[in-house]
Image: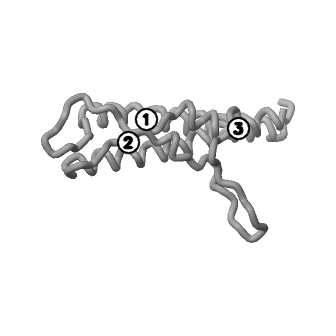
């Protein structure tokens, strides 16, 4: 029971971390909408989540080589998961930000981030309620 709860919370925590990183990337795209030559990026979320949860090995993943070195951050993204977004049209200044796509992606990711957060909160609340002593009425 406890292992299943821990595994579920670990998975959701990884998803939350990746959603947060994707939000940062999308916000950067929006902030650079007027920057000449800027290429919009996005995260291959399903692949990044599979890598973060250990379902697939990360090619070129960082490892700790010495005892004193810091371990890679949990859920850290490899550059292979940060992809350049496809341009819908060519701009004169070679900027690759499609504001309609970025706003839609940002809103979609926000909803999924909040849903993940609510799931984690609900799981913790349920676990805490299950641990409370029950008194007979």
Quarter-of-image position of residue 50 = top right
> In this rendering, does residue 125 appear at all?
no
Secondary structure under badge 3? loop
Q: Label 3, on which residue?
A: 54
Q: Label 1, on which residue?
A: 109
Q: Quadrant of the C terminus?
A: top right
User: Label 3 crowding class (10 Å Cα cut-off): few <14, some 14-19, many 20+?
Assistant: few
> In this rendering, does residue 79 appear at all?
yes
The Cα–Cα distance between marks 3 and 1, rounded to whole angstroms, is: 22 Å
User: Label 2 crowding class (10 Å Cα cut-off): few <14, some 14-19, many 20+?
Assistant: many
Q: Mark 2 or mark 1: name the one nearer the start of the chain.
A: 2
Residue drawn at x 43%, y 39% is 83
Quarter-of-image position of residue 9 = top right
Task: Report whether 70 appears left or right of 119.
Answer: right
**Total number of numbered discs in the rendering:** 3
Q: Label 2, on which residue?
A: 41
Q: Residue 74 at x, y = what percent?
A: 65, 50
Q: Residue 11 at x, y = what percent?
A: 67, 37
The Cα–Cα distance between marks 3 and 2, rounded to whole angstroms, is: 24 Å
Secondary structure under badge 1? helix
* Of residues 11 and 135, the one drawn nearer to the viewer in this rendering: 11
Residue drawn at x 30%, y 44% is 39
* Of residues 84 and 120, the one drawn nearer to the viewer in this rendering: 84
Q: Nearer the viewer, mark 3 or mark 1?
A: 3
Residue drawn at x 49%, y 34% is 44
The answer to whether 71 is drawn above or below residue 128 in the figure is: below
């Amino acid at each position: 029971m406890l292992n299943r709860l821990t595994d579920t919370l670990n998975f959701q925590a990884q998803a939350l971390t990746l959603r947060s990183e994707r939000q940062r990337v999308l916000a950067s795209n929006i902030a650079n909408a007027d920057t000449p030559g800027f290429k919009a990026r996005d995260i291959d979320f399903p692949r990044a989540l599979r890598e973060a949860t250990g379902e697939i090995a990360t090619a070129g993943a960082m490892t700790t080589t010495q005892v004193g070195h810091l371990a890679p951050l949990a859920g850290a993204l490899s550059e292979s998961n940060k992809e350049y977004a496809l341009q819908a049209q060519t701009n004169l200044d070679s900027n690759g930000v499609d504001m309609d796509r970025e706003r839609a992606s940002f809103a979609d990711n926000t909803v999924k981030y909040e849903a993940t957060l609510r799931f984690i909160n609900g799981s913790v609340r349920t676990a805490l309620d299950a641990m409370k002593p029950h008194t007979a009425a």
